[in-house]
Amino acid sequence: MTGRLVLVPGVGGGPWLWQHQLDHLSDLVRTEVLVLDEQATRAEMAQYVLDRVTGTFSLAGHSLGGWVAQEVAARAPDRVEKLFLCDTWTRSAPGTVESLDRYRRHLERDRDGALEAHFDRLLAPGRYTDREFCRRLRAWQRRMPVSGYVRQLRALARDHPTVELLPRIAADTLVVRGRHDRVVHPDEAPLLASSVHRAALALIEDAGHCTPIEQPQALTAVMRLWLTRGPA
């Protein structure tokens, strides 16, 4: 076992989001999940990762985690070796900031109502027939206190685009998109892959915005291939 892989979940996420990768990549790398729910800005989140991890490492981020991972890799191009950007973005679509602010206010008033209002956008359509999976996901989402959601959403609203960071990323980068992601615009993943030097794009079938738990075996497989391949 060599190297280290840091995994960063998205809004409301925890170690549960990356459990399959934690279980099935540990023979290759030391794995660790960092939940970023105490920081107020993307810069603070990125600095927290860099302060917590010593030396060189690989980094995987989902959604908000991928948004932060871009800044980490841009700030420390000599430290991030492999980079996985999953179900994330680089540009801010019209209305995004307003939507984030509405979601935050809804969470502050009624956490369960807000989470349920957004639940039908998270997964690939066919996944909703698995009632046990949906029950577990709803329970997992409620593990994070409202204060954590609020900080994460405020950070997103303050500094959403990442376009200026991409030319500074030197890591061997794989962009991953769930084929049926309805949260992030489908143009974002190809743009990320074409804007980061020598990055590649993997589309995961039958996955929406929650690829790490919707298709965990497929994601782990492509991550394993990327971690074990030679220099870019």
Image (tube, helix red, strand yellow):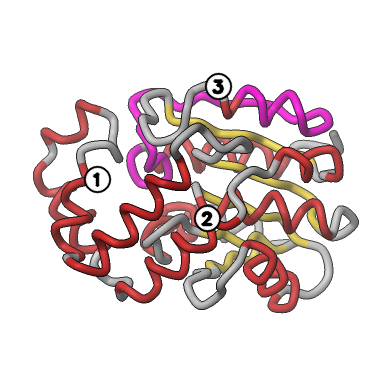
Circle 2 sits on which residue? 156
132 to the left or right of 48: left
Circle 3 sits on which residue? 187
223 to the left or right of 80: left
Q: Amino acid at mark 2?
A: Leu
Discs 3, 2 touching: Cβ within 8 Å: no
Q: Position of residue 58 (x, y in %)?
A: 71, 55
Q: Amino acid at mark 1?
A: His
145 or 136: which is nearer to us?
145
- Disc 3 crowd rating (10 Å Cα; few below 14, some 14-19, many 20+) is few
76 or 167: which is nearer to us?
167
Dividing the picture into quadrants, the one containing residue 15 is bottom left
When the figure is inspected, residue 113 is found, relative to residue 216, above or below; the finding is below
Residue drawn at x 61%, y 35% as measured from the top left: 91
Residue drawn at x 40%, y 65% as measured from the top left: 14
Q: CA distance from mark 3 to mark 1?
A: 21 Å
Q: What is the span of residues highlighted in magenta in the rendered image?
A: 190-214
Q: Position of residue 33 (x, y in %)?
A: 53, 67
The quadrant in which the N terminus is found is bottom right
Of the residues tagged 2 and 1, which is closer to the observer? 2
Of the residues tagged 3 and 2, which is closer to the observer? 2
**The stretch drawn in magenta includes residue 204:** yes
Q: Earlier in the sequence, mark 3 or mark 1?
A: 1
Q: Amino acid at mark 3?
A: Asp
**The stretch drawn in magenta includes residue 96:** no
Q: Position of residue 173 (x, y in %)?
A: 73, 38
Residue drawn at x 63%, y 68% as measured from the top left: 45
Q: Secondary structure at mark 3?
A: loop
Circle 1 sits on which residue? 118
Q: Earlier in the sequence, mark 3 or mark 2?
A: 2
77 to the left or right of 220: right
The quadrant in which the C terminus is found is top right
